[in-house]
Amino acid sequence: MKNVPIHGFALVSIAAAALAACGGGDSDGSQPFNTKPAFVGTVNAKTYDGNSDDLLTGGLGKTGLASATAPVFANPTSPTAAELRRAAIYNNYRAIVDMTADGGYGRLFGPNVNAAGTATASEGKVAGTEYITYADDGSGKQNVTLMVQVPSTFSTANPCIISATSSGSRGVYGAISTGEWGLRKGCAVAYTDKGTGASTHDLQNDTVPLIDGTRSASAAAGKAAHFRAELSASELAAFKAATPDRFAFKHAHSQQNPEKDWGTNTLQAIEFAFFVLNEQLAATDTSGAKLQQFKPSNTLVIASSLSNGGGAAVAAAELDTNGLIDGVAVSEPNVNLPTNAAITIKRGTNTLLVSGKTLYDYTTVANLYQACAALAPSVATAPGRAFVVTAFATNRCASLKAKGLLSSGTTNDQAEESLLALRAYGWEPEGAILHTSLAAFEVASAVAVTYANSLSRASVKDNLCGYSYASTTGAGVINTLAAASLAQMFSTGNGVPPSSGVQLINNLSPGGPVRDLFSASPSSQLQDFNLDGANCLRRLMTGTDTAAKKLQAGIDETRRTGNLRGKPAIIVHGRDDALLPVNHTSRPYFGLNKMTEGSASKLSYIEVTNAQHFDTFIGLPTLLGGYDSRYIPLHVYLFRALDAVYANLKDGTALPPSQVVRTVPRGGAPGAAPAITAANVPPISATAAAGNAIAYSNGTVTIPE
């Protein structure tokens, strides 16, 4: 492979400026010469041979990605950029999909499955060139990673680009499993970490990550740091003295509220893709300047991804005033609706009383009730129940009762009441059994703390609601993070602790700071999963003080409009999703789009039964038996949505109508489900039967039972 900085910008810019001065240019208003976007910094390119290393699998191939043995580092405390990249691809791919053959890997999806959906004997390695840069305003405070992969199969006669913005708070390889669809189609793939990423500032030792995941002393990194907490020397010294061995994370502590820019970052990634395509493949004029051969008017562009990345794709389409994007295909998008969107959701004949809430709103409700709900007898067989500490969950139920948030007398009744509280706040009944595993893995608390800081533009020194991040012993006592864990975090972290050995800390626990999971609430002195902290996070949503208003203003910056500008679009979402419930996300967004665009809307909403948010959990039968027998992989339907949007844009094939797709669970014993077959994942229908059709009329979305 080769590592080549891209040069020649001055000549291109001069030629373009000269033409502009003469009034020249294409009929679509663009300049005929390739120009570097103003937000793009230094660009580096590496070409991969598709054998020893490649774009999709990091040289591991289909077999290596499926292996339980992760790539190794020659020196675990000082990994190379190439080693970090390979491990990042391995971990991020596996974090999104079910990696078991019984769950569909290698048969329904995977590097060896070709563009026609046929499983082959290939290892699925993809040769091509990978370009990476920062998008920034010159301050070095944004440093959003942009990356473009151009496969060797890219067709100059049939050019296409898809975006694959990172899911969750992951780094730039966070949606590599979505990029798979584009690479096997011969499309360039435009990635961005959207201002998040597994990027941590080690405050104790003042080291920071660089764009390739390697680490540097903060002073030496300068503006090249992927993330540095904004602390003066005196503030850093005071923070370390008061709270040693802590970490700042980019999504939580950048003070940029990056979510407000996720759509912009996705558009920037697409613009960057056009630039690098022209640099690599376009013809030159007699002076050697690259022409603008690939542009929106002749290149098919689909915005895609899942979860937060899907929400970013939707945001990009809404912001796309320059016509960069032709279509949208996303899965389980995180979308925040406007205040008083006036969309009503009906399931069958029943009207839901609560819907269209923002991520922070419903997550802080989940953070209150999920741990207690995990003890409900009605979900006693829920996956992950063995990982919930019964004593702490019992205390959480009692503390909720003591604070007037529950009224029942016994623990069992309090747990069932907690389940009802979640359902009343918009969760579907099918998702009830999933609250247990989300509580076991501290999902709601992790998300709530990250977003509280991010939306509030809080500094790490604020210790918002008494939370911080640090490594701990098995008993929850703060210690020094292992050097290898920090060095490898680019490839192992998800950007939202608990992650890569870093835990969520309750600074306010009686007796001193300790891991949040084991901490006590000051008001009760009970180990109740820190209900005081959860209440503090909730008050930022419901309160009227200065801190609450800061967070609420941050949320307002992230609300969507519903205007997809007439672009063909498909949203797929699992009905059982307990992280991003359909009643707060895709269902009301579908209605908002229909209300906003009217007859110009080309959005289809596909709701998939027996599907939830974490396909990767299906592939962990020994840990989470029951996911495999109950749930099908939603990832299959993201690829089908991409196929449908591509066919619509290429040859006018009609998009499927909005509908419920009724899948068939694999069944069998939890942890030992039989292999998935095509019958488990029926296709999205070109026509919707009356009992499956999703309808919109006069502000109301009606979902069939």
Image: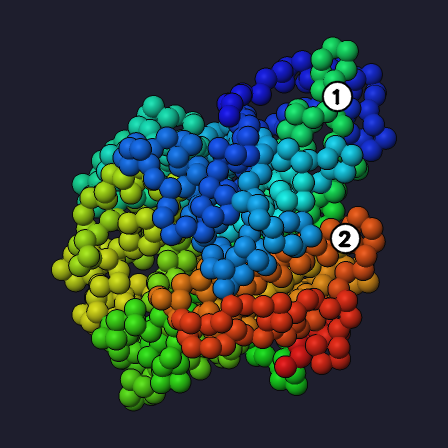
**Location of residue 536 in the rendering, given as x and y in whole percent from the top left corner:** 34, 63
Q: Which residue is located at x 61 percent, y 54 percent?
A: 119
Q: Amino acid at mark 1?
A: Ala
Decide: is 193 above or below 22.
below
Per the image, label 1 sits on a secondary structure element best described as: loop
Residue matched to label 2 = 647
Going from N to C along the chain, the mark reached first, 1 or 2, is 1
Q: Which residue is located at x 63 percent, y 75 percent?
A: 662
Q: Badge 1: how crowded within 10 Å, few (<14), some, or many (20+)?
A: some
Q: How many marks?
A: 2
Q: Which residue is located at x 34 percent, y 87 percent?
A: 413
- Image quadrant occupied by the C terminus: bottom right
Disc assigned to residue 544: none
Residue furthest left in the image: 511
Towards the viewer: 537 or 660: 660
Residue matched to label 1 = 283
- Is residue 126 at all visible to an observer of this figure? yes
Per the image, label 2 sits on a secondary structure element best described as: helix
Q: Which residue is located at x 65 percent, y 54 percent?
A: 118
Image position of 412 (left or right of 167): left
**Location of residue 574 in the rendering, given as x and y in whole percent from the top left corner:** 57, 68
Towards the viewer: 70 or 133: 70
Towards the viewer: 274 or 99: 99
